[in-house]
Amino acid sequence: MAGYTPDDLLLNDDELYKSAVDYLPKLSKGLMAIAELMHSGNDADGAYFFINATEGLRWLDGFLRNITSSDYKQTEELGGYLSSLLDAWENGDYVMIGDLLEYELVPFVEQVNTRILS
């Protein structure tokens, strides 16, 4: 698995690449904190922060769609996680949201971050 570089971006946007290098570790840490809130039964705070985190997940989706070397599978994988999160949200299943964040999305974000840094 090759790493991503600014040249892989459709717009060859160094600023977007630098934003990803800066933002992805924060997104990963934030998603893990939300998962911990959900698992500890602090659903109100977890839900509040989860709603705010959706903007970061949208940003990640846009970033992946802007990478020329990104395979379709990776964008599709993120879409599957987001669909599962939506189902859990609609069902009020905060434990499932926590599980999806901790065991699926955080590792996914960390994998993308690793590809950027390699």
Image: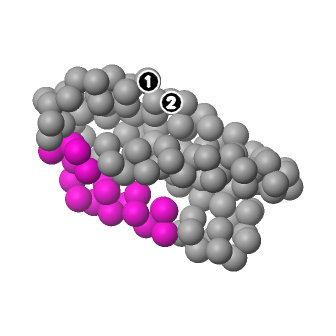
Quadrant including the N terminus: top left
Q: Tell me, yes or no, if residue 118 can be seen here.
A: no
Q: Is residue 97 left or right of residue 106?
A: right
As shown in the figure, which amino acid type bears the numbered disc 2?
Pro
The correct choice, above or below, for 90 with respect to 59 in the image is below
Name the residue beneath numbered marker 2.
Answer: 25
Residue 110 magenta-highlighted: no
What secondary structure is marked by label 2? Answer: helix
Q: Residues within 10 Å of mark 2 (few under 14, many from 20)?
A: some
Quadrant including the C terminus: top left
Q: Position of residue 96 (x, y in %)?
A: 68, 65
The residue lying toward the viewer, choosing from 51 and 115, is: 51
Name the residue beneath numbered marker 1.
Answer: 22
The correct choice, above or below, for 17 with respect to 111 in the image is above
Q: Is residue 36 left or right of residue 18?
A: right
Mark whose residue sits in front, 2 or 1? 1
The residue lying toward the viewer, choosing from 56 and 24, is: 56
Residue at the location (60% across, 59% down)?
Answer: 100
Residue 82 magenta-highlighted: yes
